[in-house]
Amino acid sequence: MRESSRSMVERLSSYRSVLCKLKTLGFVKVFSDNLGDALGISASQVRKDFSQFELKGNKKGGYQVDELIERLNEILGKNEVQDIIIVGCGKIGTALMNYNRFTSEGIRVVAGFDTDPTVIRPDARIPVLDLSELESFVERHGIRIAIMTVPEPPAPQVYERLVNAGIEGILNFTPMQLRSSGSCLIQNVNIEREIENLFYFINLQNRE
Amino acid sequence: MRESSRSMVERLSSYRSVLCKLKTLGFVKVFSDNLGDALGISASQVRKDFSQFELKGNKKGGYQVDELIERLNEILGKNEVQDIIIVGCGKIGTALMNYNRFTSEGIRVVAGFDTDPTVIRPDARIPVLDLSELESFVERHGIRIAIMTVPEPPAPQVYERLVNAGIEGILNFTPMQLRSSGSCLIQNVNIEREIENLFYFINLQNRE
DNA sequence: TAGATTGTTAATCGATTAACAATC
DNA sequence: TAGATTGTTAATCGATTAACAATC
């Protein structure tokens, strides 16, 4: 297990989800060709990825579906529940608080945080706490990953607090473009930008 | 204006938003070095990108902020309002219906669609219509881009209907991994996968 | 003029693909 | 055995970076 770029890890996730589907269809073994087709990539790429992570197949008989899923679960840490918090309980934050695809993927939202007293609900099933409790909560529960869904103005301070609290990864929905540092990994999600880019490309096509 | 990979276009968007901030700070000109620093990329990259899109600077005096913004607006189509629809008005879909960062970026949600009669509201400011009206609406309003926020089971049919209705770009929030075709460009957004990937990388770091 | 910055070309780097020997 | 598929090495491709001449 050496190198691993972001796009390679994304592919690992994709392999895993395709394999789970194939398993429900009764597949026992699968060939690099099948997986390549399913993901729209070359069979070479699949084999290369697998050898990188020591996912072994059989020269003739392809790969064992069960075995692959098992190993991918290990690699991706899907064998433990992954706890996260959500900072900023506005529209998007609230929608994510009860996102059922988190549950089905073994991701558990353990708390939300906000400064608006009207949304604080410490007794809810997933408690929404005052932001002042952030640091102590993170430490007490050993939280490592946070989703940041606050408005733009408080984003810089909230970011700083998250890093100081020891958060190691942030999924950033704010428009503030963050960059990964040694102590904290960032993944920016910018929905309006995705739309903007789609418009660019379809305009480009129509022009040509 | 030749080549343009997805990551390059993303950078164009980033340049634009940094430049807008610099403008509010009173900047009149800017150097490739400044922009590189702001985006965490090399100055070479900035100049390369700009030359690709014929964004001209002055050998000594850097680039004119106003001029750059103007050109980037053209390139990215920010001079017209960009109309989109949202198909699937569950939690995420509804949150996006009233997303104020769309408005501030010139993106207008013109309608939502759903099959659940209890969420249909044809008279709302942004109407929520029955899915049966999708095709006629898309045609009548010349809609080119849709956000897909339906649950997994109906996703394949909805996708097919969008393509047949003539939609040219989809921002896909469903877990169904779609692939761009000649007639329809896809951008997948998979939040649980982003979280999964963050966990992978922070586990990797801690292991080393 | 001397110094600084662009624009572009060449070099480097990394990721993807092709090819093929090993082998089941 | 013949045919098919893996695992790996070499070739290709594209994107990023370095370098530097042009020039303000």
Image: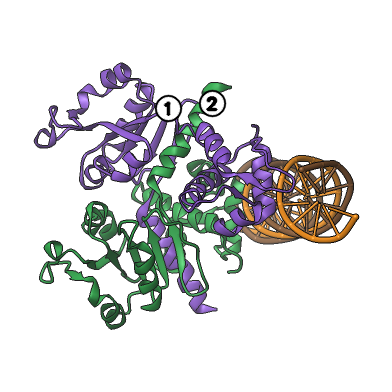
Chain colours: A green, B purple, C orange, D brown
Q: Is residue A117 left or right of residue B103?
A: left
According to the picture, the residue beneath numbered tag 1 turns out to be: B168
Q: Which type of secondary structure does the marked residue at label 2 adopt? A: helix
Estimate the x, y position of residue A28 in percent, counting from the top left.
43, 53
Q: Which type of secondary structure does the marked residue at label 1 adopt? A: loop
Kindly identify the amino acid type of the residue bearing the numbered disc 1: Glu
Above-or-below relation of B66 to A12: above
Quarter of the C terminus of chain B within the rendering: bottom right
Q: Is residue B190 left or right of residue B4?
A: left
Above-or-below relation of A114 to A38: below
* Disc assigned to residue B52: none
Report whether residue B99 is seen.
yes
According to the picture, the residue beneath numbered tag 2 turns out to be: A205
Chain to which mark 1 belongs:
B
For the point 46% across and 73% down, the residue is: B203
Q: Is residue B77 left or right of residue B47?
A: left
Q: CA distance from mark 1 to mark 2?
A: 10 Å
Estimate the x, y position of residue D10 in percent, counting from the top left.
81, 53
Kindly identify the amino acid type of the residue bearing the numbered disc 2: Gln
Residues behind callouts 1 and 2 on a single chain: no
Chain to which mark 2 belongs:
A
* 10 Å crowding of disc 1: few (<14), some (14-19), many (20+): many
Q: Are marks 1 and 2 in contact (CB under 8 Å)?
A: yes
Q: How many marks?
A: 2
Which residue occupies the foreground of this view, B18 or B155? B18
Which residue occupies the foreground of this view, A31 or B168? B168
